[in-house]
Amino acid sequence: MPIDPLPAWVLTRRRAIGDRVRAARQTRRLSQEKLGELAGLDRKTVNRIEQGTHGTSVDHLILIADAIGVPLRDLVE
């Protein structure tokens, strides 16, 4: 059963993943909208992941990693 509210360290790691997604996207000169199109996700979903405001699924991260062309581990390490 999930802890509510989530511990601060979980939120910190979520934001770090979002920062890595944003950095990888910007390195490839993709807008959030274009990344969303490539990954099959809504631009708002990409934004929420980058901001770390909402939890995301591993499936979404896999889609993003594939669309950007990086290994999943680069986004979550």
Image: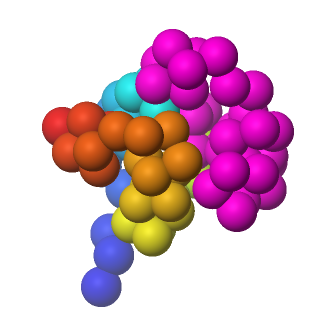
Q: Position of residue 62 (x, y in %)?
A: 41, 60
Question: 19 or 32, which is in the foreground?
Answer: 32
Q: Is residue 76 magenta?
A: no
43 is higher (above) or lower (below) than 77: below
59 is higher (above) or lower (below) than 45: below
Q: Position of residue 40 (x, y in %)?
A: 70, 62
Which residue occupies 27% across, 45% down?
Answer: 71
Which secondary structure class fits the magenta region best? helix
Which residue occupies 46% across, 25% down?
Answer: 24
Which residue occupies 21% across, 45% down?
Answer: 73
Residue 14 shown left or right of residue 35 in the figure: left
Residue 5 seen anywhere in this rendered image of the structure: no
Query: What number of labels is visible?
Result: 0
The magenta-colored residue range is 22-51
Residue 64 shown left or right of residue 58 in the figure: right
Image quadrant in which the C terminus is located: top left
Residue 27 seen anywhere in this rendered image of the structure: yes
56 is higher (above) or lower (below) than 14: below
Q: Is residue 23 magenta?
A: yes
Question: 24 or 3, which is in the foreground?
Answer: 24
Q: Position of residue 43 (x, y in %)?
A: 79, 46
Question: 45 or 10, which is in the foreground?
Answer: 45
Task: Name the outermost residue toward the bottom.
Answer: 1
13 is higher (above) or lower (below) than 27: below
Image quadrant in which the N terminus is located: bottom left
Q: Position of residue 28 (x, y in %)?
A: 55, 20
Residue 3 shown left or right of residue 31 in the figure: left
Residue 67 shown left or right of residue 40 in the figure: left
**Colour scheme of the picture:** rainbow
